[in-house]
């Protein structure tokens, strides 16, 4: 007897690709979840951070790479992540909780920007050590998102950070490079920047991102959802919980660039 999913030729019919409506619903759910972000705590020293057993995603990047703008765009909040008027001066780790109905199921960590020339050398070195210790020792760290201005490429400090987290990435830590300010690139420049970054990302994913044009917004939100909500045995592996709050209007005015 021929299986109903197998044609007369005997070759199995591949499963249907997710419909456009399904993909749109997944993106809406992920963006709605990101919109629940709220301030949790801030710490000037690593040992001041609370010990958590929830998945944590760290945002890192060189000062002026657009890190605060990226966080605010992803969460659809204009002032969640503070962009200092003096880049590099903000020297705290800020945590934001995520979850429906004020029940936290994941945490975002906004790490200080690094590499800004106006910051005294001793402060740079101290914060490089703090960040390295955080990235190496934070037990609940589930993923790292590194912002990079593609017009500058990966700097020496970016490459140093990659070396710090490489052992954890090899052990399963999720890693994403977001090439910010993608609206300033032509199509060919964007393709070239992606190719170069992928060669240097050490096995991590690379995406173009633009707060102004909303490039990469939905894809990044869905990826962060997947990092922190692995499929359960009794749940569909491709569909997040549809009870998450709806996202705000994606056409809303973007936050000011940092």
Image (spheres, helix red, strand yellow):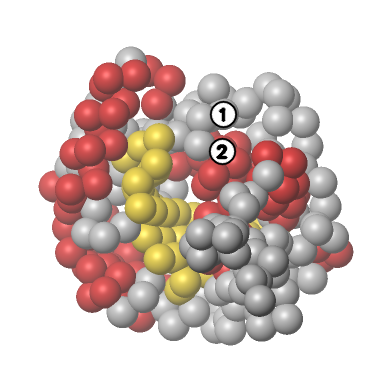
Split into 4 quadrants, where in the image is the N terminus? bottom right
Q: Quadrant of residue 119?
A: top left
* Residue in the picture at 70% in, 62% down: 240
At mark 2, the secondary structure is helix
Q: Where is mark 1, residue-wise?
A: 214
Q: Are marks 2 and 1 in contact (CB under 8 Å)?
A: yes
Reply above or below: 134 against 245: below
Label placed on residue 177: none
**Which corner quadrant of the image does residue 204 belong to?**
bottom left
Q: 257 left or right of 121?
A: right
Mark 1 surroundings within 10 Å by alpha-carbon count, few (fewer than 14), some (14 through 19), many (20 or more): some
Q: Position of residue 50 (x, y in %)?
A: 56, 79
Residue closer to the observer: 69 or 192: 192
Indicate the position of residue 39 as horizontal and vertical percent values.
67, 57
- What's the residue at 43%, 20% (across, down)? 183
Residue closest to the eye, 68 or 3: 3
User: Residue at point 68% right, 44% down?
Assistant: 19
Where residue 95 appears, as percent x and y from the top left, is: 57, 62
Residue 51: percent from left, percent from top: 55, 83
Q: Which residue is mark 2?
A: 217
How far is the residue under mark 2 from the one under mark 1? 5 Å
Q: Residue at x 58, y 68 (%)?
A: 228
Residue 12 seen:
yes
Identify the residue at the far left of this view: 156
Q: Nearer the viewer, residue 128 or 218?
A: 218
Q: Secondary structure at mark 1?
A: loop
* Quarter location, residue 127: bottom left
């Amino acid at each position: 007897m021929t299986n109903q999913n197998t044609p007369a030729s005997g070759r199995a019919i591949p499963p249907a690709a997710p419909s456009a409506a399904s993909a749109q619903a997944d993106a809406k759910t992920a963006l709605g979840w990101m919109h629940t972000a709220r301030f949790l705590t801030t710490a000037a020293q690593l040992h001041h951070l609370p010990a958590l057993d929830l998945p944590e995603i760290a945002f890192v990047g060189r000062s002026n790479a657009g890190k605060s703008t990226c966080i605010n765009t992803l969460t659809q909040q204009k002032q969640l992540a503070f962009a200092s008027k003096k880049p590099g001066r903000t020297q705290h780790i800020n945590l934001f909780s995520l979850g429906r109905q004020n029940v936290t199921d994941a945490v975002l960590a906004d790490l200080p920007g690094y590499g800004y020339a106006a910051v005294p050398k001793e402060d740079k070195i101290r914060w490089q050590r703090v960040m390295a210790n955080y990235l190496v020792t934070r037990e609940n760290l589930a993923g790292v998102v590194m912002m990079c201005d593609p017009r500058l490429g990966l700097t020496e400090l970016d490459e140093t950070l990659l070396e710090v987290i490489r052992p954890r990435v090899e052990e399963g830590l999720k890693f994403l490079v977001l090439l910010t300010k993608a609206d300033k690139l032509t199509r060919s420049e964007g393709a070239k920047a992606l190719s170069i970054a992928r060669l240097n990302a050490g096995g991590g994913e690379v995406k173009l991102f633009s707060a102004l044009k909303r490039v990469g917004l939905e894809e990044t939100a869905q990826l962060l959802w997947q990092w922190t909500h692995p499929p359960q045995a009794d749940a569909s592996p491709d569909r997040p919980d549809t009870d998450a709050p709806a996202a705000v209007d994606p056409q809303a005015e973007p936050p000011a660039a940092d």
